[in-house]
Image: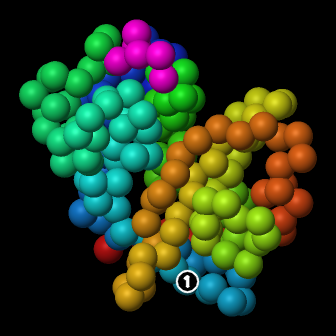
Amino acid sequence: MAYRINNLNDVDYLKILQDYRQNFAGKVAVITTNYKKLCSFKVSFSEQNLPHLMGWQKVIGKNSSATNIIRLIDNNEFTLANTRKNSEFFRIKDRLLNYNFLHDIFYGKLTNVCIMTSDMKPNKLKLDIVFYHPKDKQRIIVLGLRKRKNTPYFVPTTLHVEKIKNNPYLSRRKTSIKSFKWI
């Protein structure tokens, strides 16, 4: 059963971490698309990806390594309650509220949300693949993947919300996802 976040009151860092461990960490998703240059690709998930996806390093300050953040969450020392007052919390709030997007893509089977961006200029985040979906009339949710060097895998790199107005992703051709498989 997926952990669902409907509003800020539902956010619990430990539950997010446990859900990510259960549903993503240590797994590889094989995605087949209708894009001839990349018919199939693999997305590798690691527990170490989650802190950056959630932006937790932005509100923790010193020693913001993924390993340390995970340890603090496991020990109940890093929680929504003790980060909500941080002046940088506004930078991670949308990430937390959109954690469900991972499930929507890899379990809910959103199929028309993927674009290839490796040849896109400018590409300030250096993303190779982007999944996006409208959040509302003014914003889109973005999950960006980057190719890991010297491996056949892409890894989740960013999860955030962007404005729709003049968004470069919206002018790109969407790639349809034909199939998903967990290995």
Residue at x-position 42% and y-position 34%: 58
Position of residue 134 relative to residue 86, above or below, is below
Q: Position of residue 69 (x, y in %)?
A: 23, 38
Quarter of the image where one finds residue 3: top left
The answer to whether residue 4 is visible is no
Q: Position of residue 102 (x, y in %)?
A: 48, 48
Position of residue 60 relative to residue 142, above or below, is above
Was residue 84 drawn as part of the magenta stretch in this picture? yes
79 relative position to 107: left or right: left
52 relative position to 165: left or right: left
Quarter of the image with the C terminus in it = bottom left
Residue at x-position 83% and y-position 40%: 164
Position of residue 46 relative to residue 129, above or below, is above
The answer to whether residue 154 is visible is yes
Other-residue count near label 1 (Cα within 10 Å), few / some / many at <14 / 14–19 / ≥20: some
Q: Amino acid at mark 1?
A: Ser
Position of residue 97 relative to residue 55, above or below, is above
- The residue singled out by tag 1 in the image is 40
What is the number of callouts on the image? 1
Was residue 118 drawn as part of the magenta stretch in this picture? no
126 relative position to 106: left or right: right
Quarter of the image with the N terminus in it = top left
Q: Secondary structure at mark 1?
A: strand
Q: Position of residue 22 (x, y in %)?
A: 24, 48
Residue at x-position 73% and y-position 78%: 119
Name of the residue lying farthest toward the front? 62
What is the magenta range? 83-88
20 relative position to 158: left or right: left
Residue at x-position 52% and y-position 51%: 158
Quarter of the image where one finds residue 123: bottom right
28, 75: nearer the viewer: 75
What is the magenta segment's predominant secondary structure? Answer: loop
